[in-house]
Structures are given as structure tokens and as C-alpha cells.
Amino acid sequence: AVAIHLEDYAPAAYQIDTVDLDIQLSPRSTDVFARLAVRRHEDTDPGAPLELDGDELELVGLTLDGMPLLEDAYSATPSKLVLNAPPAEPFTLEIRTRIDPDSNTELMGLYRSSGTYCTQCEAEGFRRITYFLDRPDILSVYTTRIEARKGDAPILLGNGNPVSAGDVPGTDRHFAVWHDPHPKPSYLFAMVAGDLAHVADTFVTTSGRKVDLKIYVEHGREDRCAWAMDSLKRSMKWDEDVFGCEYDLDVFNIVAVSDFNMGAMENKGLNIFNDKYVLADPETATDQDYANIEAVIAHEYFHNWTGNRITCRDWFQLCLKEGLTVFRDQEFSSDMRSRAVKRIADVRLLKSHQFPEDAGPLAHPVRPRKYTEINNFYTATVYEKGAEVVRMLKTLLGPDGFRKGMDLYLERHDGDATTIEAFLVCFSEATATDLGQFARWYDQAGTPQVDVKSRYDKRAGELTLDISQSIAPLPGQASSEPAVIPLRFGLVGRNGEDMSFERVTGARLQEDVLILEEQSQSVTFTGLKSRPVVSLLRGFSAPVRLEDHQDADDLLFQARQDSDDFNRWQAIQTLATHDLIRLAGEARTGKELKADARLVEAFGETLLNEELDPAFRALALQLPSEADLARDIGSNVDPDAIHQARAVLRAAIGSENAGAFRAALGAKPQGSFSPDADAAGKRALANQALAYYAASGASDVDDLVMAAFVDADNMTDRIAALTLLVHDNLKDAEQALEIFRKRHEATSLAMDKWFMVQATAPLADGLEKVKALTAHPLFDFANPNRVRSLVHAFATGNATQFARQDGLGFEFVAGNVLVIDQRNAQVASRLLTCFRSWRAYEEGRSKLAETALLKISSAEGLSRDTRDIVDRCLQ
Ligand code: HT7
Ligand code: ZN
């Protein structure tokens, strides 16, 4: 496949000002009439060919200014329509294509999900509907007429505002016309048609515009939409309050569908969602589901400005909308919930998903310079690291400077398809700051490693930090330049308070942030009365790996005393990581394993510390995952040794503090269920206590966990207990699985959890069980959520079974990649990324992983998506 390079960007030769679509829906044969008002760009030579993109299209009609085109005036294939020499003056092109929504298993373009017609056009799905200049810098005003059989599709939805609707005389069909006044790129086009129920509400914007809000779902699911609607209204208000962004249409519609490649899509005025991010009630959704719904609803809504009103010039600029919008949704959730808890959750996600990506063969800059398949660049690097870069910009410029920059960006670029450079210029101009070096964050791949050694001179009362930064060489990036790293810090005195100092030399200081700009620098603080404990990277102020060589005493002190909650959490995690890595090393030598007593005690203290928010305590009690440990070990990884190490530490913490954990089981929120952060935090802590108690080996564990399962009155508690029963192989595990299945069989999202619990069970026959589940009547390769909940969950959440020493785990996943690739390339290539750290395994396993990858690589007819990932993994 041909690689596309950022440096080759050139504006299109033609512009399309308006698009009038008439879509005549029918399951197997849908006709699309597109009338395009085309105009030559002034700097394009008259007569230059017009090349429109297509993908698996059938052309059934073509006219130019109402006249059929002669055969030698154009050429058409399923993937291109070329007008050889179009008129120099503006003209109207009418294109008729025919498509088959029912056979569209890729879920890109127009397809059907449970009988509902829906579309997905980002990144390049519009070309599967009609021939078009399908690139984000072509902004057009769309009018869409949708026609369907009334009985099949009483609801007809499009972008923008409704214009008219009615019956088609003499037929069983009806139509609706929608008009979107805001010029937009084709990737934001959407339509939906189906037999759907809805819930309705309204929102009045600051300037008094009344907006009709509707959420459409399958019949019978209306009462699971309340949380999503509430989240939407809070998002609309928050964006006005915090960024001054108001909504700009008369309606805002959300449609939930069950077959969807990703989370949700921000189509103008018509967001389409994976139903997982809309539907919630206490019986079927966990607290994590509620938090995710709140975040995803906000994310898609916030795109209305950062993505839709201001869009990307080309797909290399994807982080312009995604990184910025993730940052905005993170801030929203922080304001709705506990800021510290949200920050910890976001950093855990960054470290577990983005750090490994950035350290392996799939590493790429936040703004890549080259791609062969853009769908493979909707990555943790573009989204999560992209958000971290925006967060650093705010740290460097301060809240006021950041807001000034955002205001300028929103005003200057409204209606533009623009670039990261233009974005940074707004911040630079608004605050008179040179951001030249900062821009490297967008262009360099890899996580900077920041090494800090501290020396304290007691006599002089001086502390010196010798700091260096570097990025390990990566494929295509042998060397790197120093980045601007805002390092938030505190010098913690024995009483737990931050100490003052006289002066700092060796780095710029902005309030409590040191600005690192050099490859290595020595920073000295003078005027200290005693040696402080140095608390670095507070709030995780930059996406770096910090090695600050803290000893166990200082880490324990930080875990107990640091005024920065994030670093308190980090200190206990670092202590646990150190001990787990030691234990994993010893497990490989056959030594008897014994957890560190002081660490075990610190966990007990954390549980009992009533001054700390329960949600924070629950997070602090969570051990680093097996994948986190594999990442930190970095090479010669043995998943069985890691698993054993974790089991030993978990058992030690559980048994040493068994009484306290048992007592904590009762600390559930009282009264009727509420998904708010407080109540969720209490449930999280009680369930964490249950997990540790289960690990204690006490004689009543089996009965107690089964009772917790049976008595649970919400999904959070039920799934927590079920996970323990199955993962710890407790007595009633099979019975509990059966009870759960019977109870939730009709609720697909709940059954996804049932599959996932089994997929991630670290049992000796885990793989065999998962294989058997692929033949379960409720397993379906056509449903991405189901595939993710079984095969993907196995590959990413069951380290010991995926990386089995007999290689069968790798073989199973590779075989599934090939099967899935036949029907849905995006789902297959995403699944394949679970092999990205294959070189970090010990020799035997990495050979087996390579064999599995080579098998994929040598398969016939691989999609471009899967070919791209397998080639990069093997490079
Ligand atoms: N902008 C969207 C990204 C996206 C997508 C969504 C659904 C299906 C396929 C997709 N390809 C790309 C989602 C977002 O980030 O908001
Ligand atoms: Zn997004």
C-alpha cells in the first residue's frame, strides 16, 4: 500500500460548496443521488482532472450541468471517479451510486445495525456512500433527503436542522429533509433511519437558543437513557462556562446502536454512539460504565467546537481535535468528580495503553508524519498523549494564558480546517511566549525518560538535582532533541508541609513548576533548613518516565505525608512495583517468595485512613496490573513469574490485614442507588476490601463472596463478586456464572461482562474455556463489542494464558485476527495490536509470538489495516 506523507500535503484542485443528497433506502440496494456544486480552485489550471474518491462503489448515473457525460470524458472504478477535463467555470455534478447496506460488515459508510440504517464516515467512510473529495479540508453545506419504507424506518434523521417531511404519494414510503447550515467535511456527515424510541429534553443556551435534545434507542430501552441525557445537559453548560462555547443548531440528536467500531462519533448535530456509552441503569451498568458514559457524551459534544466548527486540514492533524477534546473531557469529569481521582485514573490509562505503544514498533509522534491506513492512527498516542501535551501547555501558560490562547483559537479559526502550527501560534501570540521547542512534543515519538539524582549539602543548606532527559531510539527515530518538560514539585519537610527555599538556579521556575529544557541540567535550591523529601512530577505534570532514585523510606514517607494526592498514590505504587519486580525475579529462581512487610503494613494503613476519600483509597489499594509490571520490567518478561509475584503480595496484604478488610466490607453507601462519585467510591473501596479478603485464605471466603454475589443489588457489586468467584476459582464460580447468564441473557451489554469475566480468568485452562465460548450461541463475530469482550479481553487482560508457553494463546488470537479481518478490518487490526510488545517476552515466548505474527503476515488477502500493523510489528 502507498504511504501518505505529511510533507506532501497540497490543497485540492477543486472545492465542493454544496452537497445535496437524496438517499433512497432499501436493505440490499440503496440508491444515492448526490448533486455537488463544484468550483475550480483559483490556482488550479483550467482543465485539470477532478479525482473523486470511492470505495466499493457502483456508479449508476452521472451528469454534468444536467447533461450525461461522454464515455471518454470520465473513468470510473469502485475506488475512483475521474473527470478528465472538467469545465473551468463552476459546475454541477450529479452522481448516482448504488450500495448494499446489509452486506456492509466493515461498519464504515452506510450499514444496518439491528435493522437500523446508520452511517460512520470518519475517517474515510463517506466514499463508501458516494464519490467525493473525501478529505477533511473540503468544507461543504449539506442538505440531505432521506427516503425509506415507513414501516421499516418511521424515524429519519440527518445532520443539522429538520426542514420538511412527508409521505411519498402512492407508495408505502416517506421522506425527511435535513439542512446543516455549517460547512463541514464529509467525515462529519451522518444519517440514521429506523424504528427507534426516544427520550426528549431541552437546553437553553446562554444567548437564549432553545435546543431540542433527543436520544434515540431501540424500543424498550428508553429508561436507560436518563444518565446520558443528564450528562449531555451538564456538558452543554460546562462548555459555555469554561470555554465560552455555545451550541449552534436547533436540535441535538444522539442515536445509540449496538454494532459500532469505536466508542462514538461526533457527526454534526447527530452523534452516533456505541450503545455501551449511552445505556445505563443500576441493574446492568457498573459505576465505571456511568463514568465512561459521562465522559464520552461530553467528549462528542465538545467536538462541536473542537473538531466540527474548527476541523483538521488533513489526517496528520488528528490530535488537533482529539488530543484537545480528550483534554476537555478530562477537565469536565474532574469538575464533576474528584480531580485527584480522575487524574490518577487518566494517568493509569496513559501508562497502561500509551507508554507501551510509545516504546515498541507501533510508536509514532502525537502528530505522525506518515501513514498507510489512517484508521490505525486513532491511538492512545494521538488521543491520550495528545491530551497530555495540551495539559502541559496549560501548565506552562497558566490558566489565564491558556484561556486567552483558546479564545483566540476559537475566534480566529472558526470555520477553518487547520493545523497544529496554527493552534500553537494562537497560544504563542496570546501570551507572547515562544513555543518553538514545546512543539517538539508533537513531532517526536517515544516517552522521555527523566533521571533525577539528588544531593543535599547539609552545611550549605543546599539541595542539588542532577537532571537528564532522553528518549530511547525507536524504529525511524534514532535520536531526539530535548523537550520542554514542566516538572511540578515540592520539597517536603518532616512535618509533611512543603518547605520554602531562598533561590533556585539551573532552571526556570514558575510557581511550583521547574521548566526543564536541556538534555541535562543541575538545579540547586538554597536556604534549606533540613534535607527535604523531594516530591517530583506532582499531578503527573508531564508524560515522562521519572526515575528519581527515591529509597523506600522516602517513598513510605511520601505515601503517608505528601500534600499532593497524586504523588501519594504514585509513591505507594512505586513501592509495590519495586517489590513485585523483586518477587517476579525470585519466582524465576524457584526461591520461596515473601512480600515486604513494610509495604504490606502501608496497604493496611491506607485502607484504614479515614482522612482519605474512599475512591482514592480504592485506587491506592489496587496493585499495579500484570501488564504494568511487564512494561516496567521491559525485557525478558515472564508473565507466569509476574502473576505469581502479584498473587503472593495480594495474599500477604489480605491475610495480614484480614480483620480490617472484613470490617470494611460493610462500608457500602446507604439508601437507593446513586451513580455519583461519592457512592461509587464507597462501592469501589468495599469491593477492593472483598478482593483482599478473598486473597486472605480465610475459611469463610467461598461463602462470603458467593453471598456478596447473590445479595448484590447493582451491577458494580455483582460483577466484582463474580470476578472474584471466577478468577480465584472459588467453589461456586460455575453456579454464579449460570445465575448471571439467566438473569442477564436478554441484555447484550451485561452479557459482554459475562464473556469478559471468563476471558480474563487466569486459570490453567483459561484458553480452552475462551475457545469454547467462541462457539457459544451468544458469541457473534459480527458484533464488535462481543469480539472485544471475549477475544480482545483475552489478549489484553489474560497475560498468562495469552502468552502461554505452548504458544496456543498466541495462535488462537492470530487465528481470530484472520477470521475477523475477512469481515471487519478495523476490529481485526486493533485486536492485532495486542502483539505490539512481543519482543519484550523472554526468548521462548517471543519466538512463538513471532511465529504467530508471521502466520498472519503470510496470509492471502489481508486488509490494508491488518497488513499495516503486522508489517510494523515485524519491522
Ligand atoms: N472521532 C471519532 C473517531 C472515529 C470513529 C468513531 C466510530 C467509528 C469509527 C471511527 N473512526 C474514527 C470518535 C471520537 O474520537 O470522538
Ligand atoms: Zn474524539
Image (cartoon, helix red, strand yellow):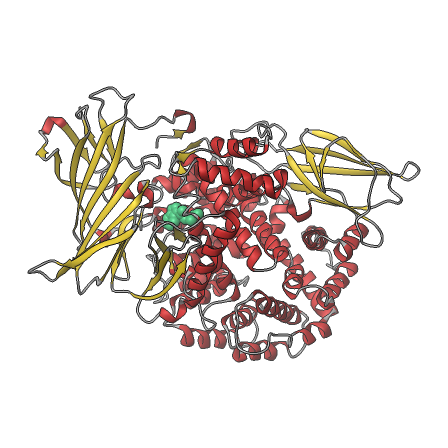
Q: Is residue 638 visible?
A: no
475 to 246, vertically: above or below: above
393 to 774, vertically: above or below: above
Of all residues, the one furthest to the right in this rendering is: 459
**Total residue callouts:** 0
Residue at position x 35%, y 42% from top? 123
Q: Relative to 93, is 137 on the left or the right?
A: right
Q: Relative to 455, is 35 on the left or the right?
A: left
Residue at position x 57%, y 39% from top? 359
Residue at position x 75%, y 68% from top? 656
Task: Look at the image and tell me in which quarter the N terminus lies.
Answer: top left
Closer-to-camera residue (384/228): 228
Closer-to-camera residue (595/272): 272
Of all residues, the one furthest to the top in this rendering is: 45
Of all residues, the one furthest to the left in this rendering is: 170
Residue 304 percent coordinates (x, y)? 40, 48
Residue 91 percent coordinates (x, y)? 17, 31
Residue 426 percent coordinates (x, y)? 51, 33
Res 124 quadrant in image: top left
Q: Is residue 467 visible?
A: yes
Q: Relative to 165, is 756 on the left or the right?
A: right
Res 705 quadrant in image: bottom right
Residue 564 percent coordinates (x, y)? 71, 52
Res 568 quadrant in image: bottom right
